[in-house]
Image (spheres, coloured by chain):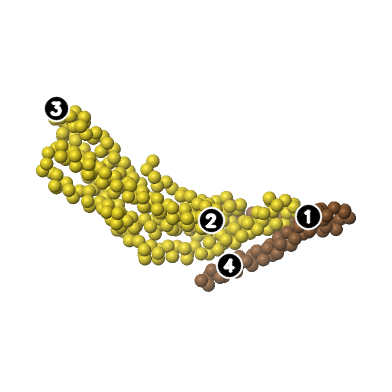
Chain colours: A brown, B yellow
Amino acid sequence: MSILQIVQNLTTEVAQIAWGLFLLAWGVGWALRGSPIPIFRIKRSGQDILEDAILAAFFLAIGSSIFALIQYLASQV
Amino acid sequence: MFSIADLLTVAQALSLLTYFIGTAIYALPIPLHGVKKWAPRLIADGIYSLVLITAYTIIVSATVELENEISGSWGYYEYWLQSTITQLSMLYQYLSLAYAGLTSIPYFGKIINSIFPTWVFFSALSLALSYLSFLQLLSLFIYNDFEVLIALGILLIALPFRIGRVIGASFISSAIVFFIGLPYLPNFLENLGLSTGQLFLPVSQVSNTTVFGLFNYMYSYLLPQMMAVTIFGPLIYLTLLASLSIGVASLISGMGGRLPFPIEVP
């Protein structure tokens, strides 16, 4: 297996793990935010996790599009 | 040995990996700022290294274009280096022959050695030759491999977690700066008033004087002039190029830079 294949396989695995982590963070975030605990800091950390998870999902979704766009722009120069 | 296309393909895969590691860290359900701060960094690094990869041909062609516009030609520079080395090694041979001849005269060698430390001259001459050979090696390396150096630098920058960011940027910047700047070295030395032609001109004026006159000429004129032309002058110029290269490296990496090869006399 060449270095290129290793890196590409690793990238696919990392992307899958990232999607899994997003689902987990989505669940954990909502659970903390909606938990019936009157401690504001815990609810706030749930909110932070949710915000980050949404950003992560956004960047995961547009990742390949960004890369294709940059390559398209570079080929036009 | 990897080709440039291979290096850039691996770099592209690595920049994707960096990007996705960034998103994975973003998605981590851990509210730790120390870990989370890496996420936007890694995403930006992935995009930045991809921009560098796509700009590779632009960087290389701009470097070659600038070299044509600013500096002299590489052909003349290599000819200058080779001819200086040849002149110095001929001087070394002549002087060692003359020294052997003079010291074969009974008691004369001892007198000469007690007045003039001849080993100083010979060691300075071989130091100058070594430095010029090192310069030749460095020039050959830069001239032949500057494209590989740039591609390798981009690959190092594409590594995740900014592992090779500083050294990668240093590879790129030193390849660019030295490729453009090195051929200007002979002109720089001439502007300083240090040309290799001056070294051997006054020999004809002293050839008909005494042996002591010749030794005086060697120690008071030839030795300082030779050190200036072959070591101090190039060293000043290389230090200038190195400073420029470190500046460009910190521009590329945003984290400072260093020189990936030595330029000082060890």
* Residue underneath mark 3: B106
Mark whose residue sits in front, 3 or 4? 3
* Residue underneath mark 1: A45
- Count residues near mark 2 (Cα–Cα under 10 Å), then give few for <14, some for 14-19, many for 20+: some
In space, the residues marked 3 and 4 are separated at their CA atoms by: 80 Å
Q: Chain of mark 4?
A: A
- Count residues near mark 4 (Cα–Cα under 10 Å), then give few for <14, some for 14-19, many for 20+: some
Mark whose residue sits in front, 4 or 1? 1
User: Please, what is the three-letter code of the amino acid marked with disc 4?
Assistant: Ile
Residue B40 lies in what quarter of the image?
bottom right
- Residue, x 45% and y 62% (percent of image)? B60
In space, the residues marked 2 and 4 are separated at their CA atoms by: 20 Å
Secondary structure beneath label 1: helix
Residue B195 to residue A71: above or below? above
**How many numbered marks are there?**
4
Q: Is residue B220 visible?
A: yes
- Count residues near mark 1 (Cα–Cα under 10 Å), then give few for <14, some for 14-19, many for 20+: some
* Residue underneath mark 2: B253
Q: Nearer the viewer, residue B8 or B6?
A: B8
In space, the residues marked 3 and 2 are separated at their CA atoms by: 66 Å
User: Please, what is the three-letter code of the amino acid marked with disc 1?
Assistant: Ser
